[in-house]
Image (cartoon, coloured by chain):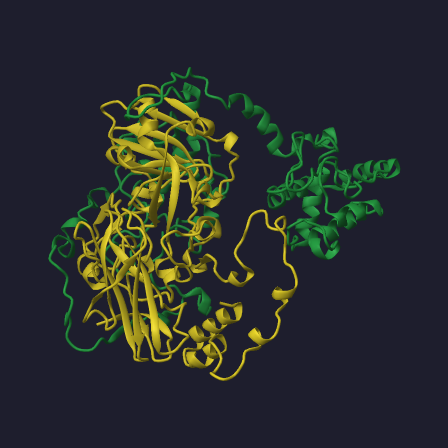
Amino acid sequence: MTTNAGASRRAILKGGLIGAAALAGGATASRAGASESLITEIQDWNRYPGDGVDARPYGKPSEFEAHVVRKNVPWLTSDAISSVNFTPLHELDGIITPSGLCFERHHAGIAEIEPANHRLMIHGLVERPLVFTMADLKRFPRENKVYFLECAANTGMEWRGAQLNGCQFTHGMIHCLMYTGVRLKHLLDEAGVKTEGKWLLAEGADASGMTRSIPLDKALDDCMVAFGMNGEALRPEQGYPIRLVVPGWEGNMWVKWLRRLEIGDQPWQHREETSKYTDLMANGKARRFTFEMDVKSVITNPSPQAPILHGRGPLVLSGLAWSGKGRISRVDVSMDGGRNWTTARLDGPSLPKALHRFYHEFDWDGSDLFLQSRAIDEHGFVQPTKDQLRSVRGANSIYHNNGIQTWHVNSDGVIENVEVS
Amino acid sequence: MWKSPKSLLLAAAVATVSIGAAQAQDIAAGEKVFAKCKACHMVGENAKNRVGPILNGIVGRAAGTVDGFKYSPAMAKAGADGLLWDEANLSGYLRDPKGFLKGNKMAFAGLKKDEEVVDVIAYLESFDADGKPATPAKQSQAPAGAAAAVTTADAAGPSRETTGSVTEAAGLKLGLGRTATPEEIAAWDTDVRPDGEGLPEGSGTVAHGMEIYDERCASCHGDFGEAIGRWPVLAGGQGTLQAERPEKTIGSYWPYLSTVFDYVHRAMPFGDARSLSNDDVYALTAYLLYLNDIVDDESFELSKENFTSIRLPNEDNFFDDDRDEEPFYADKSEPCMTDCKPGAPEITMHAAVLDVTPEDGGEENASGGGID
């Protein structure tokens, strides 16, 4: 993919009328019989040596992938310091998100903390309040786990109807990484949680002082204090030097730059669990403590930012599915807006509370398609439609929109985010 | 390697002159720019050669002259030919490393902004050849890194006795970490709960809160809590929770007053968190009650003693998660696979109608929900 092709895609998105096939012509193999100069002539890279091993001490993606970046939606928030950007899901494959493309959500920008200056405190209803250095934390037994992290507001802009044209924006507040760290239970055991302890408050060291209350049962189950992601240290924007990992639960609880854990006998009812991250229903009442992320999926290719450029013929449909309750057992796809469904092929590891990759290969005849995907998890939870969600919750919930997404493909291969009857 | 006493003297002279010109804010800004260099270069007293050479005393130094660093042949030759890192040469090099000196091995694309170049040079100038602050007067602006590293080195190790045996079963203690002191806990444990636990001593009136609010809060939240732009609305909105556009404010939505105190205390004002005294936070909380018509007397004083007697109107309208009981989740039957809906699909809503996707250039006309 060249940057020119990226620009072409934008032209298609904007114009909508230009034939995708015509634009795609340059990118496909030449007509039978004509020889390509790419093959018949010696290319620069085939003649002159390139950079040596000292040129790129920390490797970066090819310059031809420069369009594969996180993007902000400026109108969503007042200031980029307290805002969000989105993972380019349509450019990625497999189940692991590259570290530099994981969406970011900060409430007061990125805290830059030298590990030697970081401390983790555990106090409250414990036998002995403790302070750990980073060196201390690295002396506890470690584990490596792959988990997705989804913001509860992912797809939140779509409650009132189709709004953003691209899965990066509709579904891009998610990533999936391999975390390295210490089971939170080990740290809490070290301090000795008293029997009256029922909740845990996690606090970040950034200028927002992010706090969330977490039920102690969850904290003692599968939560981790992670210092690594994808085999290296956490990125600054993901909480370097440590973040909390709360598998399957909403991303806001995965406190970054984690500095304090307090044990108490009731929740703290802080800003992010009362005024935010509560789900307003149509009747004016609001659900609280909606921690778990529901079963969900989205087709990432083709999608509005990744139109079909190759014309009719063999096509690889691909997407992601996940559930905060465990593994995905099945994904179905529909070409006709949910009238008929075919079971897609799951590929790659199937890990609990991790992204799952699915594929469906088919021969596109050039007709209009209404693409949908529907995930089912190992506990039998089926991804609902957006109309089903709205019938119970109304359209003001903001959070936990896991409704089935529809992409309309027209005969030119141009794709739009729509809702259908 | 090429060394000349003459150019070392010159270097010292250049450094002395330019330090006087460097502004404190340039140095501070330069320290941030230097984050781009840190992966390869060190400055300060403990600096070592890494991927790139030590940069102590770089301004005015002859190129290619740091002991123990293996330069590219091109850089070594340039130094031998007399290349001096005065501000002009350094500026040229930092803007375009490859263009300035072909064949050098610095894998850095260059600083794009002139300001960044000026600032980072000012920052580098603040270190002398030994990595110490270039003049005593500059000490207060010296980078935090050096001083902080010294203070933390002592505290780095665990001070509790290690009990030794490695755990396999959960629950066995390793003896890691040290006991937190009461002062440390007090410094970080500022959280407040609805039952009043965590409230500090103190009090403040509506009238005093208004003064603080006008000075420190109104620029984002508006004179009456109505908010500027997309900053949070703090007041009003009562009776809108079932409307098409609910306005969720302290008065209309928030269940507990303790949340206001806790949040203002820990995170406000945005950009200068934790700068308000306990009395200030009581006063601001009182003023926010006033803006939301929950108290109507400007002389009302909120204190630790009367805090929990105040309830917010929407407290009873929250209920615990019951999503699993929603009909589409409670129904565990196999989903339909064929002929699930009648007729051909008809589009009921287009994203293009709203056209707010950034790549399409649409902005400022958001009609959907925010991310909160």
Task: Please state which of residues A127 and A203 is positioned toward the viewer in this rendering.
Answer: A127
Task: Please state which of residues A129 and B314 is positioned toward the viewer in this rendering.
Answer: A129
Q: Is residue A31 left or right of residue A176?
A: right
Residue at the outermost bottom position:
A33
Give the image location of residue A389, x and y in percent. 21, 59
In the rendered picture, chain A carries what hue?
Answer: yellow
Q: Which one of the lettered chains is coloured green? A: B
Quadrant housing the N terminus of chain B: top right
Quarter assignment of residue A238: top left
Residue at the outermost right position:
B6
Residue A386 visible in the picture = yes
Count of numbered circles on the image: 0
Q: Is residue B101 left or right of residue B262?
A: right
Task: Please state which of residues A308 and A78 is positioned toward the viewer in this rendering.
Answer: A308
Residue B205 visible in the picture = no
Task: Please state which of residues B310 and A326 is positioned toward the viewer in this rendering.
Answer: A326
Question: Is B158 situated above or below B278?
Answer: above
Give the image location of residue B228, x and y in percent. 44, 54
Give the image location of residue A201, x and y in percent. 33, 33
Residue at 37% across, 76% down: A413
Quarter assignment of residue B76: top right
Residue at 36% across, 56% down: B370
Question: Is A120 situated above or below A35?
Answer: above
Residue at 44% across, 64% down: B358
Residue at 51% across, 30% down: A117
Give the image location of residue A240, x and y in percent. 47, 39
